Image (tube, rainbow, N blue to C red):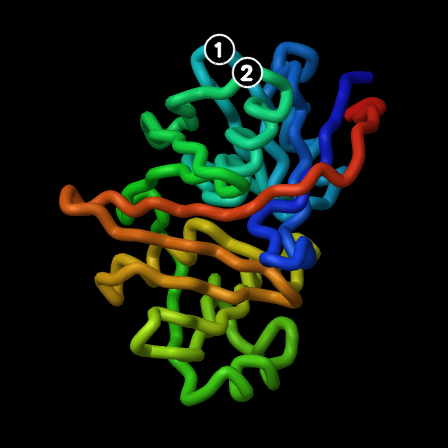
Amino acid sequence: MTELYVLRVFCGGDGGGGNPLGVVCDGAAVPAEPDRQALAARLGFSETVFIDDAARGVVDIYTPTARLPFAGHPLVGVAWLLRHLGRPVATLRPPAGEVAVAYDGDLTWVRGRPEWATGRRTEEYGSPAEVDALPAPPPGEGWLYAWAWRDRAAGGVRARAFPRRGDGIREDEATGAAALTLTHELGRALDIRQGAGSQILTRPRPDGAIDLGGRVALTEIGRTGRA
């Protein structure tokens, strides 16, 4: 058994919402990729992340069925957790590449690139009410990020995320990679309200990278048991 932190990432300003994330701080306790995949499947979170080198920020990310080179909510969560444990980092290193980290009050920011967030289709709806009325998941196949303007002038967006990949995750409460994709497509900073009560902040940078920011809360500290 190894220690497992469960976080909620991209919480709303009132502390609600947030996408659950499992974090295994001692990645060496689960060294083999098949065992990591099995553990992620058993835990059932949309993502589980393994910290392989806290000092250097080396991490490994899994959904219940696949290993990911980049994902926003696990990286924001890990960056927050390392600061919470007294080990803040300036850079995280998932397989996709180096991810800059910044801390600003209760917000944790990570920086990603649009080419790291492929495979997510965005679809604009006419109003937030239309987005809210969608079943979970809507009919069809493939990753869908459904969104509508809440306040176009202010960059306010209402969104819901549907992985539709057959792994039991009917709806993703807060999705950094999809928010990165939408920000790239719209070319502007966004304040995204997603799921039941989550908030994702984004800001594009001159070099094409995009910052993802949000609040994180610690839900519990437990043990993984056997993978």
Of 31 and 20, nearer the camera is 20
**In the figure, is residue 137 to the left or right of 59?**
right
Residue 28 position, x and y percent, is 63, 10
Q: Residue at x 39, y 78 (%)?
A: 151
Against 87, residue 145 (above or below) is below
Residue 56 position, x and y percent, is 44, 13
Residue 149: name its quadrant. Answer: bottom left
Tell me which amino acid carries mark 2: Arg
Tell me which amino acid carries mark 1: Ala
Earlier residue among tags 1 and 2:
1
Cβ atoms under marks 1 and 2 closer than 8 Å: yes
Residue 219 position, x and y percent, is 76, 40
Q: Which mark is residue 36?
A: none
Compute the Cα span from label 1 to label 2. Answer: 8 Å
Against 83, residue 118 (above or below) is below
Against 2, residue 36 (above or below) is below
At label 2, counting other C-alpha atoms closer than 10 Å, the crowd grade (few under 14, some 14-19, many 20 or more) is few
Of 148 and 120, nearer the camera is 148
Q: Residue at x 46, y 18 (%)?
A: 58
> Is residue 65 visible to the viewer in this orientation of the structure?
no
Name the residue carrying label 1: 55
At label 1, counting other C-alpha atoms closer than 10 Å, the crowd grade (few under 14, some 14-19, many 20 or more) is some
Residue 4: name its quadrant. Answer: top right
Looking at the figure, which quarter contains the N terminus? top right
Q: Residue at x 58, y 77 (%)?
A: 138
Numbered disc 2: secondary structure = loop
**In the figure, is residue 91 to the left or right of 53?**
left
Name the residue carrying label 2: 87
Looking at the figure, which quarter contains the C terminus? top right
Numbered disc 1: secondary structure = loop
Q: Nearer the viewer, mark 1 or mark 2?
A: 2
